[in-house]
Image (cartoon, grey):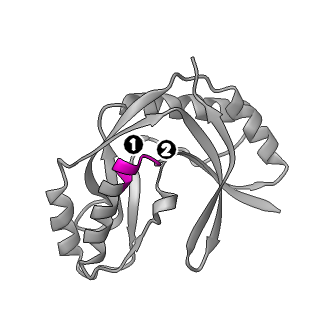
Amino acid sequence: MSIRTFISVDIEDPNVLSKIKLVKNSLSSLGADLKLVEDENLHLTLVFIGEVPEPQITVIKHALQKVKHKPFRIHLYGAGCFPTCNRPRVLWIGTKEGSEEMTQLYKKITSSLRKEKISFEEEKDYTPHLTIARVRSNKNIGKIAKLLEALIDEDFGWIEVKEFRLKKSTLTPKGPIYETLASFSLSE
């Protein structure tokens, strides 16, 4: 049996979550065709590994235990869309201070995975971001762009990054269900 996996930093700070919730509420009131990310699923993706045979989970955990990086803070700031706000598919909250540390952590994790010959989705230009919604159709996309434009300098707060997690993603008709398979503390 294979397991769909990814590595992330979860968003658990109540103050940050309440600010994100306000944006999600605003988005849901636009009448746009969106799939909002559930509050309990909010995270910063480090690496999407994808489907792996169950026995390989042990190898992945072993690779991740070798990653050494000191704890850091990351500033969630601003909002935008991928690929563009004229043709949005993903709505996100960006990062400011701490982005470099997140990118360094990404590089250390991918290096460790490569050494164990674990394949994953390679990011050419890794950009830390927090996905808050996926756009299903073009319905009311002008309203989405206007709202996100107003949030370009929005301060969502800081999160402490003290660990990262290996997660299992089970796709269901109602959306993905995430389960933590292992947590890895950051230390010097």
Which residue sits at x=37%, y=31%? 98
Q: Residue 127 bears which disc, if any?
A: 1
- Residue 114 horizontal side relative to residue 77, left or right: right
Which residue is the site of mark 2?
123
Q: How many marks?
A: 2
The vertical placement of 162 against 12, above or below, is above
- Residue 150 horizontal side relative to residue 134, left or right: left
Q: Residue 8 bears which disc, if any?
A: none
Helix, strand or loop: magenta stretch? helix
SS at circle 1: loop
Say if residue 35 shows up in the picture.
yes
**x and y, in percent, of residue 159 in the image:** 40, 39
**Residue contact at pointers 1 and 2, CB within 8 angstroms:** yes
Image quarter (top left, top right, bottom left or bottom right) of the N terminus: bottom right
Mark 2: amino acid:
Glu
Which quarter of the picture shows residue 20? Answer: bottom left
The span shown in magenta is 12-17
**x and y, in percent, of residue 68 in the image:** 60, 22
**x and y, in percent, of residue 79 in the image:** 26, 53
Which residue sits at x=71%, y=41%? 118
